[in-house]
């Protein structure tokens, strides 16, 4: 069984390297001194003080984000295997990947998985948020329980799904058969396309609450007066949603979609627990394939190059995200 | 349980007496002085030894391992810690230990890992050769997977095999009084069983054990191999195509169609639930049956891999212990392995395993544990037919790459899904050429 420890280290470093957290703003009251001397005198100078204040953040960023990320890039352009120093091989690893049919399948799968899952999460999350935004009894309890799939450790919830998809004991098959809908069991994970569908389903189940709760927060900032005004002007419910609600919550929606895309791109646990990339390598994504190559075949360089394929796409996503958020400034 | 233990202990005593005669010379010839002779500790005070192992399927085995490790600690005056983790978590732990040059002194090596991690492992020639000398030689597979370029990189520890688990009662119902000895006969029996809605079970998904047990063994049984002894890819052969055709026919005629979705645990559950009549597995199904489903334990038995045109083969792993190159306690580590693998200790360990694993040398086939339960005898004899990933070439890093890419498994899985056998063999050839490049 896979557990939380076996996340693809390299994929993670690539992903986290790209999503650097902006340095926190630190406000420090500098005491007034009669005549600054020594250290106090030095700190009076703005550029020195700025440097001192920024230093801890810089050190943390360098140690925990920049260093692993640069190491990831170095590995990807080296022939490093476990226990041996690596030699620089340029883009050789990337070339090998592009000629590897399993990699190309993983490449395609990563995009299919991310885009379909994100779109579904957005649609269902929005629907759930609109429902939760209504007034009804036990509203708070329902809202809180929405978050459960997101809180339960992925490995645990995925194991439960594994049982539900089990070839012999699937509860879905049992229900469908007893309801007379199917006469033969469905092999949920026994076919490439079907297995990919199941993986997307579990990802949507797990990720949708994040969308729902965040969008709900967005919906609650929409001024009810605007809806009333639109209603008086004769707008129906759909028009009010499309013309009033959606434009107002668009910024928060975009941020949620982008965060979710980054997480889904780099997904590992869910797929590794359910299919390990099988059957016939039809459900490998970058994360799972990189893990097999880097950890189980001990080819750290090649594995890093697989997970670094994520980087250009994540970079584009992040550049867009930053551009969009700053546009309003 | 208590009753059977008392019987064995008498047997074991007799066995040890005989063993003592055989080992006497070796002991006098320099077996670990310190501990074997129960002398006072000779290691500096505060010496520590840390061991990383898998969690065995047999809990009693882990208990015995820890007990023996603690006993060594007391005798040698060393603080011993034994951490047991899930087998799947060993690879990342080993990689980070070797790369950071810090971690346990001894780590369990499974399958061909000594080849994979050779650069991070200290030579243990003296330990391995001592065992070989005492026991009269290792199984061929123990030697091949643990020896890299003529040096022992890990000390062979145990052999675990996946053999056929089958329902004797149901096989008899379709006229098979014993398990078929050839693949063709098994197909006939399997066809009759599937007609009775009692199919044979075999995984073809991505998991470490079962799918490979079929893919490698069947390929060899039909006379095909991934590479030749020089490392040249030779998979695209008429023998491979025969093996593929056989597998596709076997899938249609005999196998449970859930197999493509199975991992290593599905066949255990299906067998115990009575939905399949036979499957390749370790002794885990039988052990669980004995505890929880005695009627299944009574109705089942184990049998060897059938023979193909080229003979009988098992895809086999085996466990070993690597002493890490970065370790500052290599001497203690080696002493521990010497002591552990010596007969009085290893005898207790192997007995605690109850037949789930056997020893690394044919010597242990004579252990009385094998007389306890005739249904486990197949496991005793399987390692003789064991071959390694990359056979007949080296079980190298490249062989590992082919293994983790599931090239052979996927070759069969794609043929089952409808790819022409010729195309599946061609696909495997192209992929293997990249892995073995």
Image (cartoon, coloured by chain):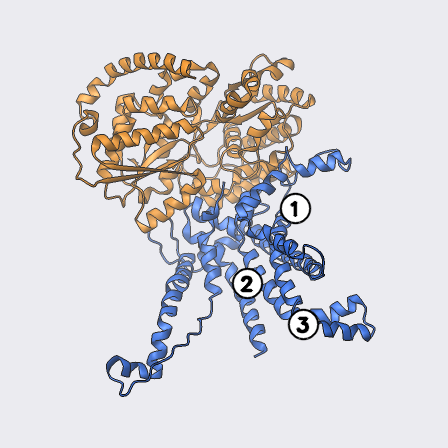
Q: Is residue B404 left or right of residue A239?
A: left
Q: Earlier in the sequence, mark 2 or mark 3?
A: 3
* Residues at discs 2 and 3 in contact (Cβ within 8 Å): no
Q: Give chain A's shade.
A: blue
Q: Earlier in the sequence, mark 2 or mark 1?
A: 1
Pick out the residue farthest to the bottom. A35
In the displayed structure, would residue A44 be above or below residue B259? below
Q: Is residue B173 in view from this perspective? A: yes
Whether residues under marks 3 and 1 lie with C-beta atoms below 8 angstroms apart, the answer is: no
* Residue at the limit of the structure toward the front, as seen here: A137
Report the residue at 32% width, 21% height from top.
B347
- Please report, as a chain letter, where disc 1 is located: A
Determine which residue is flagged by label 1: A193
Q: Which residue is mark 2?
A: A313
Residue annotated with mark 3? A248
Spot occupied by residue B259 in the image (x, y as percentages of width and height): 61, 33
Query: Chain B's colour?
Result: orange
Disc 2 from disc 3: Cα separation:
28 Å
**Numbered disc 2: secondary structure:** helix
> Which x, y percent locates residue B317?
42, 32
């Amino acid at each position: 069984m896979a557990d939380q420890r076996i996340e693809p280290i390299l994929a993670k470093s690539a992903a986290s390297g790209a999503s650097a957290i902006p340095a926190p703003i630190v406000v420090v009251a500098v005491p007034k001194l009669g005549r600054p001397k020594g250290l106090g005198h030095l700190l009076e100078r703005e550029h020195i003080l700025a440097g001192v204040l920024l230093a801890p953040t810089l050190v943390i960023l360098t140690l925990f984000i920049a260093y692993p990320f640069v190491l990831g890039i170095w590995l990807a352009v080296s022939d490093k295997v476990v226990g041996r120093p690596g030699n620089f091989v340029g883009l050789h690893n990337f070339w090998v990947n592009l000629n590897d049919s399993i990699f190309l399948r993983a490449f395609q799968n990563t995009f299919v998985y991310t885009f379909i899952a994100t779109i579904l999460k957005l649609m269902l999350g929005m629907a759930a948020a609109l429902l939760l935004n209504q007034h009804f009894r036990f509203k708070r309890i329902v809202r809180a329980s929405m978050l459960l799939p997101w809180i339960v450790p992925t490995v645990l919830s995925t194991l439960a799904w594994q049982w539900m998809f089990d070839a012999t004991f699937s509860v879905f098959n049992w229900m469908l058969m007893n309801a007379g809908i199917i006469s033969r069991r469905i092999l949920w994970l026994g076919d490439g396309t079907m297995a990919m569908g199941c993986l997307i389903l579990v990802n949507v189940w797990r990720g949708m609450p994040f969308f729902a709760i965040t969008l709900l927060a967005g919906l609650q900032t929409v001024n009810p007066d605007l809806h009333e005004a639109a209603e008086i002007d004769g707008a129906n419910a759909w028009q009010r949603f499309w013309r009033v609600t959606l434009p107002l919550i668009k910024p928060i929606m975009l941020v949620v979609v982008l965060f979710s895309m980054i997480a889904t791109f780099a997904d590992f646990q869910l797929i590794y627990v359910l299919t390990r990339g099988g059957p016939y390598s039809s459900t490998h994504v970058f994360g799972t394939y990189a893990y097999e190559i880097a950890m189980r075949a001990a080819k750290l360089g090649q594995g890093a190059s697989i997970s670094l394929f994520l980087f250009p796409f994540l970079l584009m996503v992040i550049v867009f995200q930053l551009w969009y958020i700053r546009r309003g400034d | 349980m208590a009753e059977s233990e008392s019987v064995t202990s008498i047997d074991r005593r007799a066995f040890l007496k005989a063993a003592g005669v055989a080992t006497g010379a070796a002991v006098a010839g320099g077996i670990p002085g310190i501990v074997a002779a129960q002398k006072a500790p000779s290691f500096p005070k505060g010496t520590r030894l840390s061991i990383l192992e898998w969690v065995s399927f047999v809990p009693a085995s882990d208990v015995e391992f820890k007990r023996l490790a603690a006993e060594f600690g007391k005798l040698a005056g060393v603080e011993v810690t034994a951490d047991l983790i899930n087998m799947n978590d060993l690879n990342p732990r080993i990689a980070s230990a070797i790369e950071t040059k810090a971690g346990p002194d001894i780590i369990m090596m499974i399958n061909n890992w000594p080849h994979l991690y050779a650069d991070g492992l200290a030579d243990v020639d003296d330990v391995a050769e001592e065992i070989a000398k005492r026991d009269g030689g290792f199984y061929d597979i123990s030697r091949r997977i643990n020896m890299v370029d003529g040096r022992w990189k890990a000390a062979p520890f145990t052999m675990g095999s996946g053999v056929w688990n089958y329902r004797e009662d149901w096989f008899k119902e379709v006229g098979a009084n014993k398990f078929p000895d050839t693949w063709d006969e098994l197909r006939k029996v399997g066809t009759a069983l599937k007609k009775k809605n009692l199919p044979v079970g075999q995984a073809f998904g991505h998991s470490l054990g079962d799918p490979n047990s079929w893919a490698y063994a069947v390929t060899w049984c039909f006379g095909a191999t991934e590479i030749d002894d020089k490392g040249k890819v030779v998979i695209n052969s008429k023998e491979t195509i025969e093996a593929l055709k056989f597998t596709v026919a076997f899938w249609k005629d005999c196998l449970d169609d859930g197999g493509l979705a199975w991992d290593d645990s599905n066949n255990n559950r299906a067998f115990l639930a009575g939905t399949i009549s036979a499957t390749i597995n370790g002794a885990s199904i039988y052990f669980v049956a004995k505890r929880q489903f005695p009627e299944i334990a009574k109705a089942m038995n184990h049998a060897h891999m059938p023979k193909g045109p080229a003979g009988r083969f098992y895809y086999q792993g085996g466990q070993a212990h690597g002493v890490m190159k970065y370790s500052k306690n290599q001497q203690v580590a080696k002493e521990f392995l010497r002591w552990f693998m010596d007969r009085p200790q290893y005898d207790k360990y192997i007995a605690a395993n109850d037949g789930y694993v056997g020893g690394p040398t044919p010597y242990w086939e004579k252990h009385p544990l094998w007389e306890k339960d005739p249904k486990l005898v197949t496991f005793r004899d399987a390692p003789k037919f064991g071959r390694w990933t990359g056979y007949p070439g080296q079980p190298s890093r490249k062989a590992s790459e082919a293994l983790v890419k599931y090239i052979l498994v996927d070759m069969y899985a794609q043929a089952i899904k409808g790819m022409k056998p010729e195309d599946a063999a061609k696909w495997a050839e192209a992929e293997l050429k990249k892995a073995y490049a």
